[in-house]
């Protein structure tokens, strides 16, 4: 096995080196946050937005944010890690932050540690799926709406259960609903519906993850004078739409081909994928 490295608290170590104990709070309580970041064409995509989001999330969870936790420092560490792992093409970067050991549910400290990992990807840039995804709703567990609903935490059992349902039903993805029954996101993506050229996406107040790629799509829409509205999404919204697509930081856009008995086109998905790839140059 080739050596694979990660960065733990600023130091390069072997990925399989036992650096974290069984008392780790991410392991015990899911007391952690993470960001998935794309590296492509020599660029770390939207890093400032990722760092801003994780710092705001740390503040919400009352974690201490180190002064050196800046976009510049994290960029330096990511580039160093890519060099150590001899990754020259696209990569998925995972930045994980967790509260340090101590305490039971109530922490002994709010100081943090962090881990950066890098995994090579086969694709270059953002690649739109050729075949539309087949999706349906996972409603067995509804996502509550509260101050941590928008945060990407290590407490991900809702998404794990939705993923198991996706596999058992042989779907490509599942759509999650909130406590009010509104559709808010998929297992790992935000959701957009297109009707007559206008975009509709679930508002943050409905409990979806505050996605970095969601923000980019709304920005691109604004720059290109495409109307976009943040409003509650229902089954009717989806079945009445012309297109549905999912967005996340690694894949960019994945278009949905079928939801229940409704089939979709992908014109807007193609457009936004082209715009995202322009940003990689």
Image (cartoon, rainbow, N blue to C red):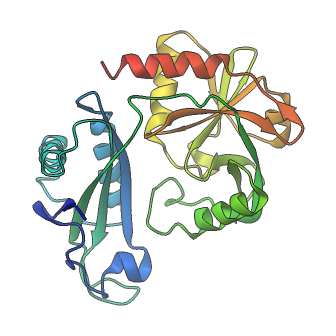
Instruction: Report the number of discs.
Output: 0
Quadrant in which the N terminus is drawn: bottom left
Quick one: which residue is furthest to the front in this view?
1
Which residue is pictured at 19% across the width and 75% down the height?
17
Which residue is pictured at 65% across the width and 24% down the height?
199
Q: Quadrant of residue 101?
A: bottom left
Residue 95 % position (x, y):
30, 55
Residue 257 % position (x, y):
74, 32
- Answer with left or right where residue 146 lies relative to residue 82: right
Compared to residue 249, the image places residue 229 above or below, namely above
Q: Is residue 264 visible from the viewing direction of this image?
A: yes
Question: Is 39 or 3 nearer to us in this picture?
Answer: 3
Residue 89 % position (x, y):
28, 35
Question: Is 111 or 5 nearer to us in this picture?
Answer: 5
Which residue is pictured at 79% across the width and 36% down the height?
258
Q: In which quarter of the image is residue 67?
A: bottom left
Residue 53 % position (x, y):
36, 47
């Amino acid at each position: 096995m080739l050596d694979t490295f990660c960065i733990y608290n600023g130091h390069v170590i072997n990925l399989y080196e036992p650096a974290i104990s069984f008392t780790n709070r991410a392991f015990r309580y899911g007391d952690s946050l993470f960001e998935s970041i794309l590296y492509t064409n020599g660029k770390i995509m939207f890093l400032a937005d990722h760092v801003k989001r994780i710092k705001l999330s740390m503040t919400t969870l009352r974690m201490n944010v180190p002064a050196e936790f800046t976009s510049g420092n994290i960029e330096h560490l990511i580039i160093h890690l890519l060099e150590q792992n001899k990754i020259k093409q696209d990569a998925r970067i995972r930045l994980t932050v967790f509260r340090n050991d101590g305490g039971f549910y109530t922490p002994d400290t709010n100081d943090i540690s962090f881990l950066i990992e890098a995994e090579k990807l086969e694709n270059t840039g953002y690649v739109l799926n050729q075949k539309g995804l087949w999706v349906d709703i996972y409603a067995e567990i509804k996502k509550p709406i509260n101050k941590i609903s928008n945060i990407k935490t290590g407490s991900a059992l809702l998404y794990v259960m939705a993923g198991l349902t996706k596999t058992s039903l042989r779907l490509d993805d599942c759509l999650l609903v909130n406590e009010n029954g509104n559709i808010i996101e998929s297992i790992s993506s935000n959701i957009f519906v297109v009707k007559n050229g206008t975009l509709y996406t679930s508002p943050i107040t409905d409990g979806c993850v505050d996605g970095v790629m969601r923000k980019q799509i709304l920005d691109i829409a604004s720059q290109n004078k495409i109307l976009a509205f943040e409003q509650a999404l229902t089954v009717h919204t989806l079945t009445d739409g012309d297109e549905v697509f999912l967005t996340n930081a690694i894949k960019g856009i994945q278009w949905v081909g079928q939801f229940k008995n409704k089939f979709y086109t992908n014109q807007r998905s193609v457009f936004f994928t082209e715009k995202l790839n322009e940003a990689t140059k």
